[in-house]
């Protein structure tokens, strides 16, 4: 993956070397596609320039906030992941503050503990003490646009059919994409999309992540049935992302079922095929 990070940065090197506000690089990819790995390697590849990586996962609403949302809007919103279960305002405040970070005025970036399904205490957040030249924002639903109202009518799986019979949950999620999340996407200067071959391979990738937890006997590990239900929350937008994100990408990275890079293509037409 190290050459991948270098290829991703190729069209951005000139801008990164110039003084000014941080460049915000968005890395979008479905579950298990390698977003966190690429983000870590981008941090290494951009050195010695200062850079930070933020995950959309780290700004989930607290467990108490999601329970409240489940009571007032729809029960399915207790499960983290879909648009509407993030504290978008918290992320905006972090992005606003990072250009002004200093030892005397550090910017504290939130962290989320998936083991407890809750945000970590502020004392455990990550401190940034100097303005970054590059801000990497990664997440599974980044850059996804809202669907049409007509696309929401038919349920896409058993979860929607049985637990969102009136479409209220998927309508709420779509409304978030149309408003708060669309505004957030506008802050990204360059989009990198890790394109999986299909949704079925995403199921397998996510199961591989869960298998590692099961082998460690981690308390948050899910069995096959629980995992299938969990993934069902993301199926609609995952399939939507596979269909529409390639045309929205500034840098498109097509992956095979083993996460090997088949092709990297920049919007300017430059391409790299391993």
Image (cartoon, grey):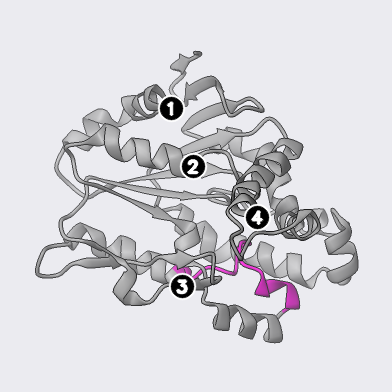
Disc 4 to disc 3, how far (Cα)?
A: 27 Å
Label 2 crowding class (10 Å Cα cut-off): few <14, some 14-19, many 20+?
many
| Of the image marks 4 and 1, the number of the one nearer the N terminus | 1
Query: Residue, x 49% and y 42% (percent of image)?
Result: 35
Q: Residue furthest left?
A: 104
Q: Position of residue 72 (x, y in %)?
A: 69, 86
Q: Position of residue 261 (x, y in %)?
A: 54, 22
Task: Left or right? Give the position of 16 relative to 159.
Answer: left
Give the magenta-colored segment's residue range. Answer: 74-88
Q: Position of residue 103 (x, y in %)?
A: 10, 64
In the image, residue 85 lies in the stretch drawn in magenta: yes
**Which residue is disc 4 drawn over?**
146
Q: Please tell me how crowded label 3 is: few (under 14), some (14-19), or many (20+) other residues with Cα within 10 Å.
A: many
| Disc with the residue nearer the chain's start (3 vs 1) | 1
Labels 2 and 3 touching (C-beta < 8 A): no
Q: Which residue corresponds to mark 1?
A: 1
Residue 55 occupies which quadrant of the picture?
bottom left
Residue that mark 3 sits on: 119
Tell me if mark 4 has few (under 14), some (14-19) or many (20+) residues whose alpha carbon lies within 10 angstroms of its own.
some
Q: Secondary structure at mark 1?
A: loop
Looking at the image, is mark 1 or mark 2 earlier in the sequence? 1
């Amino acid at each position: 993956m190290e050459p991948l990070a270098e290829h991703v940065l190729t069209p951005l090197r000139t801008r990164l070397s110039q003084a000014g506000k941080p460049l915000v690089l968005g890395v979008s990819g479905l579950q298990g596609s390698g977003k966190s790995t690429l983000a870590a390697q981008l941090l290494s590849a951009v050195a010695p320039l200062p850079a930070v990586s933020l995950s959309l996962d780290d700004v989930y609403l607290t467990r108490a906030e999601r329970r409240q949302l489940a009571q007032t809007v729809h029960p399915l919103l207790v499960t983290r992941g879909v648009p509407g279960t993030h504290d978008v305002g918290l992320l905006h405040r972090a992005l606003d503050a990072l250009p002004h970070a200093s030892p005397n005025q550090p910017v504290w970036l939130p962290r989320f503990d998936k083991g407890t399904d809750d945000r970590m205490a502020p004392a455990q957040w990550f401190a940034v003490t100097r303005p970054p030249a590059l801000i990497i924002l990664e997440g599974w639903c980044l850059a996804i646009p809202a669907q049409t109202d007509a696309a929401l009518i038919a349920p896409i799986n058993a979860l929607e059919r049985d637990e969102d019979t009136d479409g209220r949950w998927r309508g709420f999620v779509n409304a978030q994409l149309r408003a708060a999340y669309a505004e957030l996407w506008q802050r990204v200067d360059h989009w990198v999309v890790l394109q999986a071959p299909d949704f079925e391979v995403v199921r397998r990738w996510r199961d591989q992540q869960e298998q590692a937890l099961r082998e460690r006997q981690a308390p948050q590990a899910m069995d096959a049935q629980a995992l299938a239900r969990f993934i069902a929350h993301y199926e609609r937008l995952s399939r939507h992302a596979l269909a529409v994100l390639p045309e929205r990408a500034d840098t498109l990275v097509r992956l095979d079922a083993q996460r090997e890079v088949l092709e990297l293509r920049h919007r300017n037409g430059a391409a790299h095929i391993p």
